Amino acid sequence: MNESANPWDGQLVRTWLERRCEAARLDQAAADRRGYEARDDYDLAAAEEWTCRALRFPDRTADQATFAQRIKDLIGQDDYPVTGIHDDRRVHRNVRAHLRKLAKMTKANEGFGNTLRYQ
C-alpha cells in the first residue's frame, strides 16, 4: 500500500461504514415512500448498505492491507446476496461501483473523515 501522511485508523473506517450504512437505510426508506419511480434509488441505496455491512467488522478494518484485500475479494465475486431489491443486475453493478470507490479511498487513505449523510 502507499504510505500516506495519515496513519490508518480502523475505528474511523468502521465509523464511516456504520454512518454510510445508516444513511443508505434512510435513503431506502425515502425511495420506498416515493414508490415505483424510485426503484433505481432504492437499489442504489441497498447496494451501498450491503457493501458497508460486508466490510464494517473490526477484523476487516484493523489493517489497511487486510481491508484492501477484502475489497478486492468482494469485487471478484460473481454474485452478491442482496434481498428485497428490484433489479439484480443493477444492484450488482452498484455494489461493484461502491467497492471501487472504497478501494480508491483505501489506497489513498482519505475520505473516511467525511461522515456527512450526503456525499
Image (cartoon, grey):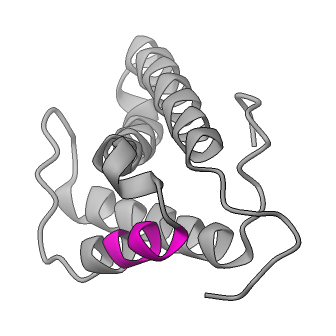
Indicate left or right for 40 with 13 as reference. Answer: left
Q: Quadrant of the N terminus?
A: bottom right
Q: Residue furthest right?
A: 5
Q: Quadrant of residue 109?
A: bottom right
Majority secondary structure of the magenta segment?
A: helix
x, y percent for residue 67 = 43, 66
Q: Nearer the viewer, residue 2 or 36?
A: 2
**Displayed quadrant of residue 70:** bottom left
Q: Nearer the viewer, residue 92 or 39?
A: 92
Q: Which residues are drawn in magenta?
A: 64-70
66 relative to 94, above or below: below
- Outermost residue, bottom side: 2
Q: Is residue 5 above or below residue 53?
A: below
Q: Quadrant of the C terminus?
A: top right
Where residue 34 sits in the image (x, y, percent)?
47, 17
Q: Residue at x 61, y 69 (%)?
A: 106
Residue 84 shown left or right of residue 76 in the figure: left
